[in-house]
Image (spheres, grey):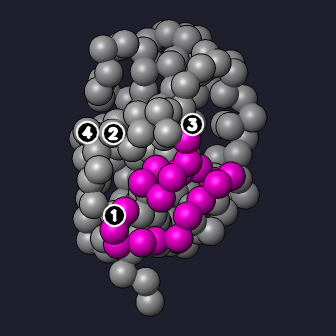
Amino acid sequence: MSKFHIAQVNIGRSKAAPQDPIMAGFMSRLDEINAIADTSPGFVWRLQTAEGNATDLRPYEDERILVNMSVWESIEQLKQYVYKTTHADLLRQRQAWFEKFSGSYTALWWIPKGHVPTVDEAKKRLAHLESHGPTPFAFTFKESFPADEQFIKEE
């Protein structure tokens, strides 16, 4: 049994505010998609406010950047949720709601089992990925790294 979990963050610049009609197709599916995550094998935790999602959080100066974070038991289980459930429908339609993002918009990193990552921690991982490419500190599905205690700590 692993003593590590995988954390993930993804951000996107919405085409409009969450309450704008342009975003209705995305916003109307959030509860459904989050419920699938919550009951998926390997799911541990996700970032959410009292509303049950994280669309009210604004961790960047740009008010239209939305953030999503979650923790999973393994990369394989996270990948299964992202690409093999109804969540994949939203990925295929994301250009309807989100602008093309020029920088790094998703990052994965290992955390000690029981740790709940912060938004600031996630922002550091994304920035590191943007500056250095995939490393054991922050990586992608395409280029991942095994858990290694020396990279678990903040750089």
Q: Amino acid at mark 3?
A: Arg
State which quadrant residue 68 falls in: top left
Kindly check if marks 4 and 3 are in contact, taking CB atoms under 8 A apart as contact.
no
Q: Gap between marks 4 and 3, in whole Å?
A: 27 Å
Q: Considering depth in this image, is 30 or 91 the residue closer to the camera?
A: 91
Which residue position is annotated with label 2? Answer: 124
The overriding secondary structure of the stretch rendered in magenta is loop
Q: Amino acid at mark 1?
A: Ile
Q: Gap between marks 1 and 4, in whole Å?
A: 15 Å
Which residue position is annotated with label 3? Answer: 29
Is residue 152 depicted above or below 143 in this figure? below
Q: Residue at image x 55%, y 64%?
A: 145
Q: Nearer the viewer, mark 1 or mark 4?
A: 1
Is residue 15 depicted above or below 112 in this figure? above
Earlier sequence position, callout 2 versus callout 1: 2
Identify the secondary structure beneath mark 2: helix
Mark 2, Cα crowd under 10 Å, few <14 / some 14-19 / many 20+, is some
Q: Gap between marks 1 and 3, in whole Å?
A: 33 Å
Identify the secondary structure beneath mark 1: helix
Q: Position of residue 20 (x, y in %)?
A: 49, 10
Q: Nearer the viewer, mark 2 or mark 4?
A: 2
Q: Gap between marks 2 and 4, in whole Å?
A: 6 Å
Residue 48 visible, this angle: no
Magenta span: 133-151
Q: Gap between marks 2 and 3, in whole Å?
A: 29 Å
Q: Disc count in the image?
A: 4
**Residue 152: mark in rendering:** 1
Q: Position of residue 127 (x, y in %)?
A: 40, 34
Which residue position is annotated with label 4? Answer: 120
